[in-house]
Image: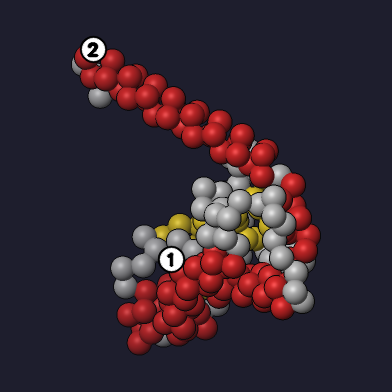
């Protein structure tokens, strides 16, 4: 399967496809790395969090296995981050900026190190924070991203956020996150129920 980033014009896509065709013919011995994979013509070179192979240069085709190893390491990094933030769920935004698996590992590692240093300096999470944050979610994004609570109740943090600032932000915004998470959950169930009802009505009148 082949796809491309939104915003590309026809000439851009045509040129990229021609380049990909030429690379495939010139480096056929490496094409086995792409068998069964979704190829995305994007702005970076790497394997995305969805496992798609984003291509910009031929070097990636030769290094897909290396990027795959980063993809397999992500659960370990996410588990480590969760464990030092009271089992908070490490999540991803549906429309978060595209990032390679290797970059995402770096982002997680950067935040893990920051929080580890926080504890290493003898600091602690405030007593006002529940012993378990399992019902909450946090999304780790690129260094220049915002520190915020999303409309769905997720904590969004840049990987460069100092641990002191992040933990203080979480502590201060737990109530808002709880409210937004609850509203999102209710709205999601209502939306599913409405979708089911509409679908059943169309079936009843013979429209599928």
Residue toward you, 147 or 112:
112
* Quadrant in which residue 163 is drawn: bottom right
Q: Is residue 61 above or below residue 152?
A: below
Tell me which residue sits at (66%, 44%) in the image: 174
Q: Is residue 142 left or right of residue 72?
A: right
When asked about the image quadrant of residue 167, the answer is bottom right
* Mark 1 surroundings: few (<14), some (14-19) or many (≥20) residues within 10 A: some
Residue at 45 percent across and 61 percent down: it is 50
Image quadrant holding the C terminus, namely top left
Q: Secondary structure at mark 2?
A: loop
Q: Quadrant of the N terminus?
A: bottom left
Say which mark, if any, is on residue 51.
Answer: 1
Q: Residue placed farthest to the top in the image?
A: 205
Observer able to see residue 41: no
Kindly state the secondary structure of the residue where label 1 is placed.
Answer: loop
For the view shown, which residue lies furthest in the front direction? 127
In the visual, does 121 lie left or right of 19? right
Front in this rendered view, residue 15 or 82: 82
Q: Earlier in the sequence, mark 1 or mark 2?
A: 1
Q: Which mark is residue 91?
A: none
Residue with the mark numbered 2? 205
């Amino acid at each position: 399967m082949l796809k491309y980033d939104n915003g590309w014009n026809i000439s851009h896509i045509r040129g990229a496809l021609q380049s990909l065709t030429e690379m495939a013919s010139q480096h056929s011995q490496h094409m086995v790395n792409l068998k069964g994979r979704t190829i995305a013509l994007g702005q970076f070179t790497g394997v995305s969090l969805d496992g798609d192979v984003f291509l910009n240069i031929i070097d990636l085709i030769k290094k897909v296995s290396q990027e795959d190893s980063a993809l397999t390491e992500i659960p370990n990094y996410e588990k480590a981050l969760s464990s030092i933030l009271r089992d908070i769920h490490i999540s991803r935004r549906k429309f978060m900026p595209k990032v390679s698996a290797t970059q995402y590992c770096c982002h997680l590692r950067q935040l893990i190190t920051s929080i580890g240093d926080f504890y290493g300096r003898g600091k602690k999470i405030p007593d006002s924070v529940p012993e378990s944050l399992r019902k909450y979610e946090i999304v780790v994004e690129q260094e220049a991203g915002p520190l915020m609570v999303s409309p769905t109740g997720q904590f969004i943090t840049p990987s460069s956020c100092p641990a002191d600032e992040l933990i203080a932000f979480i502590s201060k915004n737990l109530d808002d996150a709880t409210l937004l998470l609850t509203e999102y959950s209710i709205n999601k169930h209502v939306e599913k129920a409405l979708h089911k009802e509409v679908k059943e009505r169309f079936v009843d009148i013979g429209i599928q």
